[in-house]
């Protein structure tokens, strides 16, 4: 928590300092007083859940191509650290189950983003199965996506996890009925921080939706957002916003 008692979410780990969504970034974040570790999941060609932000390996590895076209073993042949600096060479891609174990070890909650679910038929069911098999406490999990249908699908499955909808600044729909609709199946409404106003947060709270904007890395922006009564922030730099 911050000094102002709002939640701090470590976006892809301590990703401002370490290669995102890697073991070294996660372990650095988990040692801080964060409320959630945020991760991104995709599905491989052999039906495994892996943790990476983009739907390709191009930006954060020494390979090219779509995640969905790789098997897990093929993805493991790539380096996911060197792009951030030579000292980070040798970082491997993580399976979702690896991160589940890590979060449990540190007794931290996970904010899981389903990336591009339209590319991965059955990813929701696979995620729920792995969560059930791992016997993770539902109170330690929030599942979110920009794809509202994906979150509605998880809600329809009767899963006992809190759910969230992400809002991009590029697709801003700000109309009152949408808050009401989202509140029927979700608990969080997490927008790009540029969309946040006091009116936005007040309306979300009216429908019992918590608001945790992304990606907040600047203290001046953070201070302005606090005045809107947000519930938390999603940040690449949790070390400067939490009581560490």
Image: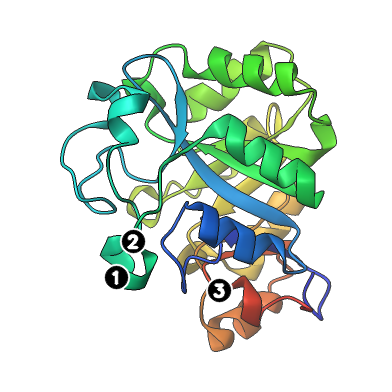
Look at the image and tell me whether residue 209 can be seen. Answer: no
Q: Is 190 rendered above or below residue 215?
A: above
Residue at point 29% right, 53% down?
60
Which residue is more in the foreground, 164 or 78? 78
- Mark 2 Cα shell of 10 Å, populated few (<14), some (14-19), many (≥20): some
Categorize mark 1 by other alpha carbons within 10 Å: few (<14), some (14-19), many (20+).
few
Position of residue 7 in the picture relative to residue 214 (left or right): right
Closer to the chain start, of discs 1 and 3, is 1
Compute the Cα span from label 2 to label 3: 21 Å
48 sits to left or right of 188: left
Residue sitting at x 78%, y 68%: 33
Residue 237 marker: 3
Residue 107: x and y, percent?
82, 49
Quadrant containing the N terminus is: bottom right
Q: CA distance from mark 1 to mark 2?
A: 5 Å
Q: Which structural element holds mark 2?
A: loop
Label 2: which residue? 89
Q: Which residue shows up at 23% across the image and 53% down it?
A: 59
* Contact? badges 1 and 2 (CB < 8 Å): yes
Gap between marks 1 and 3 measured at Cα = 21 Å
* Residue 86: assigned label: 1
How busy is the neighbourhood of tag 3: few (under 14 within 10 Å), some, or many (20 plus)? many
22 horizontally vs 104: left or right: left
> Helix or strand or loop: what does disc 3 sit on?
loop
In which image quadrant can residue 121 be found?
A: top left
Kindly indicate whether the residue at mark 3 contacts the one at mark 2 (C-beta within 8 angstroms).
Answer: no
Residue 83 pos. (x, y %): 27, 63
């Amino acid at each position: 928590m911050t000094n102002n008692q709002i939640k701090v979410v470590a976006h892809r780990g301590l990703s401002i300092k370490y290669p995102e969504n890697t073991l070294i970034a996660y372990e650095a974040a988990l040692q801080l007083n964060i409320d959630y570790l945020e991760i991104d999941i995709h599905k491989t060609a052999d039906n495994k859940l892996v943790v990476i932000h983009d739907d390709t390996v191009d930006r954060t590895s020494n390979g090219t191509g779509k995640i969905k076209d790789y098997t897990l073993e093929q993805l493991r042949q790539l380096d996911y650290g060197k792009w951030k600096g030579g000292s980070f060479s040798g970082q491997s891609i993580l399976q979702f189950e690896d991160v589940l174990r890590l979060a449990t070890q540190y007794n931290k909650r996970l904010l899981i983003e389903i990336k591009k679910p339209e590319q991965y038929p059955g990813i929701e069911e696979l995620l729920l199965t792995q969560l059930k098999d791992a016997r993770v406490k539902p109170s330690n999990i929030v599942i979110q996506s920009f794809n509202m249908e994906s979150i509605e699908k998880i809600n329809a499955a009767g899963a006992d996890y809190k759910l969230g909808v992400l809002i991009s600044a590029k697709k801003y729909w700000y109309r009152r009925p949408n808050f009401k609709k989202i509140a029927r199946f979700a608990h969080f409404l997490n927008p790009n921080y540029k969309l946040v106003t006091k009116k936005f947060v007040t309306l979300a709270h009216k429908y019992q939706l918590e608001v945790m904007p992304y990606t907040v890395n600047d203290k001046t922006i953070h201070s302005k957002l606090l005045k809107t009564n947000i519930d938390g922030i999603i940040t690449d730099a949790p070390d400067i916003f939490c009581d560490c």
